[in-house]
Image: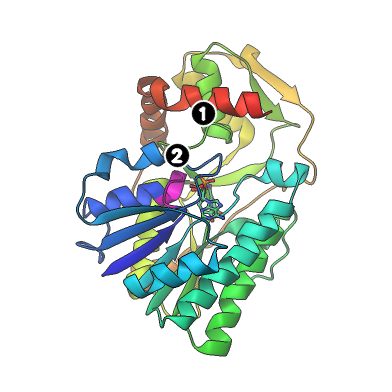
Amino acid sequence: MKLLVTGGAGFIGSNFVRRALNDQLPGIEGAEIIVLDALTYSGVRENLDPIADSPRYEFVHGDICDAELLDKLMPRVDGVVHFAAESHVDRSVRDSSIFFETNVIGTQRLLDAALKHGIDRFVHVSTDEVYGSIEEGEWTEEWPLEPNSPYAASKAGSDLVARSYHRTHGMNISITRCSNNYGPYHFPEKLIPLFVTNLLDDKHVPLYGTGENVRDWLHVDDHCRGIALVYTKGRAGEVYNIGGGTQLTNVEITKKILELMGKDWSYVDHVEDRKGHDLRYCVDITKIQNELGYEPQVPFEQGLANVVQWYRDRRDWWEPLKERAALEG
Ligand code: NAD
């Protein structure tokens, strides 16, 4: 099996690549991997250092929008796992152009190249945010797409492009929609790593609005195992939700982080809410459980404690990223 993994230097993609090359993902043991990554602000080549010497790994610095490059890479692989995206909602609120270029046009270019070269299998990694916000209950995969942020709209657009390539061309494509991931190597602009790294520096943490927004938390290891199951056993043209089974308000998760870090609520600054902030996300994962035997395995309390410890140990990883992000404003 030879895979092209786009966005493999990012948070989730690099976890997938590290685990795949360490034969920790069911069904894709022994796979060779070409990572294609543009190394945008959130792409960190060092995320792949632990497997950099693997003879089954190759890194290509390039853009998923580059059709010529894709033409050269596709004949060398038989499958694609597509993570590359602009992924931060707040950035899409400030300026959404690059979100539509990368997430929609980039996905279309990739699918076109995969079609042209007769790629056997394509998994498109998406998000539960395409469903919008749900006050109660859970989204099944049949839920209408009602994205609220420009980020979510661009991901919904990419999902529809992927669906259309299956329907029109019969391509063997599945789409995954996961909840909020957490884990090591998470870029320190997202809630958990931002709060943990701020507190490690004895700084305050910014909590949006009242903090009543509810998210389901999914450990990145569980997510990548779910993606591997979908890659090997998922049905063509189908969508699979992937969740972690731990729903918390932002106030609740903030309290857990403060407790783990030995800090109190005085470190929390209530800041103006994010524009159009979705109140609640919650995915129904019955389909992937019943069809593919997926279950989240990392207990949240354990996973969070390990993440806190990872950021304590890896100042060398996150400090330069935060400094660079601050300089870029
Ligand atoms: P990330 O921002 O950490 O990584 C994205 C990677 O894509 C980076 O390495 C970046 O350099 C690369 N990239 C961006 N534009 C590119 C381009 N034009 N060509 C090639 N590479 C490019 O994101 P992540 O958190 O790892 O998310 C991965 C995927 O999972 C995304 O598709 C995202 O929408 C989805 N997702 C993430 C979460 C989450 O909680 N993090 C939740 C649901 C879905």
User: In the rendered structure, which amino acid carries the disc numbered 1?
Assistant: Leu
What's the residue at 53%, 17% (across, down)?
199
Q: Is residue 14 visible?
A: yes
User: Residue 149's spot in the image, x, y percent?
Assistant: 74, 52
The residue at which mark 1 appears reads as 321
- Crowding at label 1, few (<14), some or many (≥20) Cα neighbours within 10 Å? some
List the residue tagged with mark 2: 44
Residue 175 shown left or right of residue 59 in the figure: right
Residue 134 seen in the current view = no
Q: Is residue 42 magenta?
A: no
Q: Which mark identifies residue 283?
A: none
Range of residues picked out in magenta = 8-13
Q: List x then y, in percent, for residue 9.
A: 43, 46
Identity of the residue drawn at 37% across and 80% down = 120
Does mark 1 have its CB less than 8 Å from ligand 1? no
| Secondary structure under the numbered disc 1 in the rendered image | helix
